[in-house]
């Protein structure tokens, strides 16, 4: 009996399932991606403030992430659909993105060492852009890889395992500065305009973990060869070989994708606010620091605590991700996602009422439920509606509904905090909670292709 990359040729290809450990190895690289992403999320705002950024400017610097994602992911998806070499279809992009991101992880926290004043801030923002672009290069093909290799009845499991590994990597990445400070006695202090050693060394370790995790996926997982891929998904209909086809595909996007776009808008608008404004919100609202304090030990402690609570929501998401396939099979993917988003909204709003920093650990439980579902359910719903041979480009186009709300928030968020909220960043967090709940309501208008097919069979 002849063997293939993931099974046997006489087994029906479209029904071929992967074992748990095959899915694990295929998804393991996401642990490294999220390790680096967590370091960025938990520390980028405080690093930029160390370099001289004002609170109302933070969202503008964070615009780099969605802008690069909006441009890079559809292009990477388009070309990864057409790539096949010794590494495979998606793997070459994993590797290139990882190497560039590791370089950015090494350089970003050292911008204040090589430069001073506004130049340090400018160079730091450039390294942040490099990190974001490379993470997008590495991340987009992972979504397509899961959808490529798994039948629909395993996709919820596949995206859930991926989400578990995302949570695991993010927990360690978020907590690493605190661990280095409190367990290994690495200094958390630094002169004004520079980054503390515990953060710098966290970024160094992040680069190593990122590369190691991606290597597991590259070395121990396989992809379908072109002939097998066509036997499963059908022969792709590529109108042209140029980038102009992306626009054609955009116009022809499945109805389910458009409906999910509204859910994604509210969800990712909320997440962007949380990532950008949690550090100043906690520094002002919990630590009672003035908005001008961006370099004291108390401010650095607030930034470290942000890493701790972000680690909590990622830890909750890792555990909840393993439960999602069972919950979704019983209550449906849409209901599961709506419940999770409501929990996230309540968690964010509760931060306003927190009597102390420890209460924020409870707030993050709800955020963790939402984060796990956001990383799994929309993609599981979407994958069943994507036409043959278009998995990569449509996963990239779907990223538009993630990046657009972040860009809008990035442009308007800072001025709103400054002029409407009087520089009190906690109100941006409250608005994020409200948006998360609105996203939950939008979920009920989405058509899940699997649910429709099951109803048809009845």
Image (cartoon, helix red, strand yellow):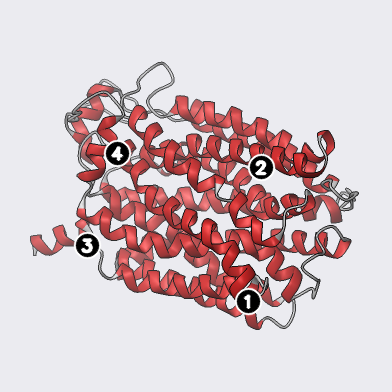
Q: Which type of secondary structure does the marked residue at label 1 adopt?
A: helix
Of residue 26 and residue 392, the one placed in the foreground of this image is 392
The answer to whether any part of residue 299 appears in the image is yes
Q: Along the polypeptide, which appears first: circle 3 or circle 2?
A: 2
Instruction: Work out how far the residue at label 1 is from the one at label 3, CA to CA, in angstroms.
Output: 33 Å
> Where residue 398 appears, x then y in whole percent?
35, 48
> Where residue 360 appears, x then y in whole percent?
67, 73
Question: In this figure, which residue is indicated by the disc labeled 3?
Answer: 447
Going 87% across and 61% down the picture, which residue do you hit? 296
Instruction: Work out how far the residue at label 4 is from the one at label 2, CA to CA, in angstroms.
Output: 32 Å
Q: Please indicate whether residue 392 sits to the left or right of residue 418 in the image.
A: left
Instruction: Work out how far the residue at label 2 is from the one at label 1, CA to CA, in angstroms.
Output: 28 Å
Q: Along the polypeptide, which appears first: circle 4 or circle 2?
A: 2
> Where residue 25 appears, x then y in whole percent?
48, 37
Do callouts 2 and 1 mark residues in contact (Cβ within 8 Å)? no
Q: Which type of secondary structure does the marked residue at label 4 adopt?
A: helix
Do callouts 3 and 2 mark residues in contact (Cβ within 8 Å)? no
Question: Dot 4 surroundings within 10 Å: few (below 14), some, or many (20 or more)?
Answer: many
Question: In this figure, which residue is indicated by the disc labeled 1?
Answer: 351
């Amino acid at each position: 009996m002849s063997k293939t990359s993931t099974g046997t040729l006489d087994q029906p290809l479209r029904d071929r399932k992967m074992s748990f450990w095959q899915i694990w190895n295929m998804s393991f690289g996401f642990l490294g991606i999220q390790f680096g992403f967590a370091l960025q999320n938990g520390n980028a705002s405080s690093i930029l403030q160390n370099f001289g950024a004002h609170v109302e400017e933070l969202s503008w610097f964070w615009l780099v992430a969605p802008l690069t994602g909006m441009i890079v992911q559809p292009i990477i998806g388009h070309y990864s659909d057409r790539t096949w070499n010794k590494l495979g279809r998606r793997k070459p992009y994993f590797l290139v993105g990882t190497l560039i991101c590791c370089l950015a992880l090494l350089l970003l926290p050292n911008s204040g060492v090589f430069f001073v004043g506004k130049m340090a801030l400018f160079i730091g923002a450039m390294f942040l852009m490099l990190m974001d672009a490379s993470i997008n290069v590495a991340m987009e093909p992972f979504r397509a890889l899961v959808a490529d290799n798994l039948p629909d009845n395993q996709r919820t499991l596949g995206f859930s395992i991926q989400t578990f590994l995302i949570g695991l990597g993010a927990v360690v990445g978020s907590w690493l500065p605190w661990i280095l400070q409190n367990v290994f006695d690495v200094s958390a202090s630094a002169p004004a305009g520079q980054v503390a050693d515990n953060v710098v060394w966290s970024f160094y370790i992040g680069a190593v973990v990122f590369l190691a995790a991606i290597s597991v996926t590259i070395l121990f997982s396989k992809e379908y060869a072109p002939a097998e891929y066509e036997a499963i998904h059908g022969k792709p209909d590529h109108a042209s070989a140029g980038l102009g086809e992306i626009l054609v595909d955009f116009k022809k996007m499945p109805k389910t994708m458009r409906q999910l776009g509204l859910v994604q808008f509210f969800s990712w608008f909320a997440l962007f606010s949380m990532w950008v404004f949690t550090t100043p919100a906690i520094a002002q609202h919990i630590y009672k620091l003035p908005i001008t304090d961006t370099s004291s030990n108390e401010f650095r402690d607030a930034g470290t605590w942000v890493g701790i609570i972000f680690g909590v929501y990622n830890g909750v998401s890792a555990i909840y991700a393993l439960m999602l396939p069972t919950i979704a099979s019983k209550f449906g993917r849409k209901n599961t996602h709506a419940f999770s988003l409501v929990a996230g909204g309540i968690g964010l709003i509760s931060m306003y009422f927190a009597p102390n920093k420890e209460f924020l650990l409870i707030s993050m439980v709800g955020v963790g439920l939402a984060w796990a579902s956001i990383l799994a359910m929309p993609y599981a719903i979407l994958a069943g509606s994507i036409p043959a041979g278009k998995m990569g480009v449509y996963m990239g186009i779907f990223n538009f509904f993630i990046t657009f709300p972040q860009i809008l928030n990035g442009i308007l968020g800072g001025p709103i905090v400054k002029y409407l909220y009087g520089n009190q960043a906690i109100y941006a967090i409250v608005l994020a909670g409200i948006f998360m709940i609105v996203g939950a309501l939008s979920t009920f208008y989405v058509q899940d292709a699997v649910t429709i097919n099951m109803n048809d069979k009845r």
